[in-house]
Amino acid sequence: MSIIIAGTGSYLPERVVTNAEFETFLDTSDEWIVARTGMKERRVTSGEPSWKMGELAARKALDAAGIAPEELDLIICTTVTPDYLFPSCACMIQGAIGARGAFAFDAAAACAGSVYGIDMARRYLATGDINTVLLVGAETLSQVANYEDRGSCILFSDGAGAAVIKRGDGPYGSCLRSDASGAHQLYCKHIRKDTPFYKSDAPFDGGLFEAELVGTTYMNGQEVYKFATAAMPEAVIGACERAGFAPETLDMVVPHQANLRILETAAKRLKLPMEKISVTIHKYGNNSSASVLIGLDECIREGKIKEGHRVSLVGFGAGLTYGAAAFEYHSK
Ligand code: UT7
């Protein structure tokens, strides 16, 4: 069983942050950022919460699919920057769009989230119990960036992507992996308050990780880079194997956008030209689980992904998590 991607949508905040803006408060330069990451500018929220961006992306996906919110059975939101610990971002989106018949929950797998989400949607659909899933990746990473760390804050951005997914036929394969041996290379500690029973200096508090940054992202860029350059091709090759076609026959790869150099290295390993790799990093930066769904939406709307095309979606990030799905794209 495969999937139909009945419609996609995305939302990017209007506020554009150029590399030059970072030069005003950091020891950095446009030249360094472009050369080392491929980023020229990124979109950053000026108030829109994750759930609102998710709602706006979801509305576009529903319009594209020609599906009413009441027809949705399940909403999965893959955010790692939810506005509330509870209710879930997915429930906030459900309420906002009026999807009264759907159950809704968040599933966090960082920047691999939307790929895990695609696979989870397919497995729910395979049971036959439900027919229509809305998958949303909505993130406000700018709110958890460390603006004193020039090696990471320049990367992170905000936005949302969405897809309406239904049951389909044809080849499908996935390859999902987690490797917690690298968990300490990329993390953001959740805020906890002292209570009468819990003190933040208690012996087990955060002992795993080196830096005690609460609500702020820590990243060992070089280690994550090494992981990502190996993980991305491994996942795509694994997914294609299970789908029953060779990676070289892919028409389009839609990867998580972390660094243009990672995408170029992966393209070489996959023996694919860069025209077959979706790139949005120069304009949108790294918005975690939103990036693959935004890229997918753009590729479909621009005609780079057409009916019957062989497509692979691939993500990698904190956890460490990585994974890919490979399938033939059909919207009906
Ligand atoms: O979405 C989740 C997955 N995330 C990723 O996949 C990110 C993976 N990592 C990367 O993309 C890259 O490692 C970075 C873009 C974060 C950094 O690039 P790099 O080529 O690995 O740089 P580096 O950390 O090795 O640093 C090289 C030099 C250092 O200076 P020295 O020690 O050689 O004097 C850094 O201090 O560049 C310096 N540097 C900067 N210079 C100007 C680091 N950040 C900056 C900066 N501007 N923003």
Image: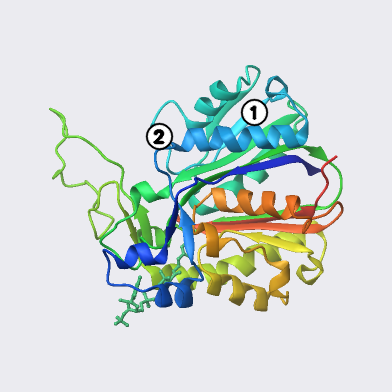
Tell which circle, 1 or 2, labels the residue nearer the N-terminal end.
1
> For residue 221, which quarter of the picture?
bottom left
Can you give x and y, in whole percent of width and height, for residue 323 in the image? 60, 56
On the rendered image, what quadrant is the C terminus found in? Answer: top right
Q: CA distance from mark 1 to mark 2?
A: 20 Å
Q: Is residue 95 visible?
A: yes
On the rendered image, what quadrant is the N terminus found in? Answer: top right
Q: Is residue 126 visible?
A: no
Give the class, few, some or many, for how many residues have Cα within 10 Å of label 1's Cα (few <14, many ≥20): many
Taking the image as four quarters, which one is ligand 1 found in? bottom left
Q: Is mark 1 within 8 Å of ligand 1?
A: no
Q: Which mark is residue 175?
A: none
Residue at image location 41% in from the left, 49% down from the top = 141
Instruction: Indicate how the structure is coloured in the image.
Output: rainbow
Q: Amino acid at mark 2?
A: Asp
> For residue 241, which quarter of the picture?
bottom right
Residue at image location 63% in from the left, 69% down from the top = 233
Residue at image location 68% in from the left, 37% down from the top = 61
Per the image, label 1 sits on a secondary structure element best described as: strand
Per the image, label 2 sits on a secondary structure element best described as: loop
Can you give x and y, in whole percent of width and height, for residue 123 in the image? 70, 39
Can you give x and y, in whole percent of width and height, for residue 168 in the image? 83, 41
Identify the residue under disc 2. 83
Q: Which mark is residue 74?
A: 1
Q: Amino acid at mark 1?
A: Leu
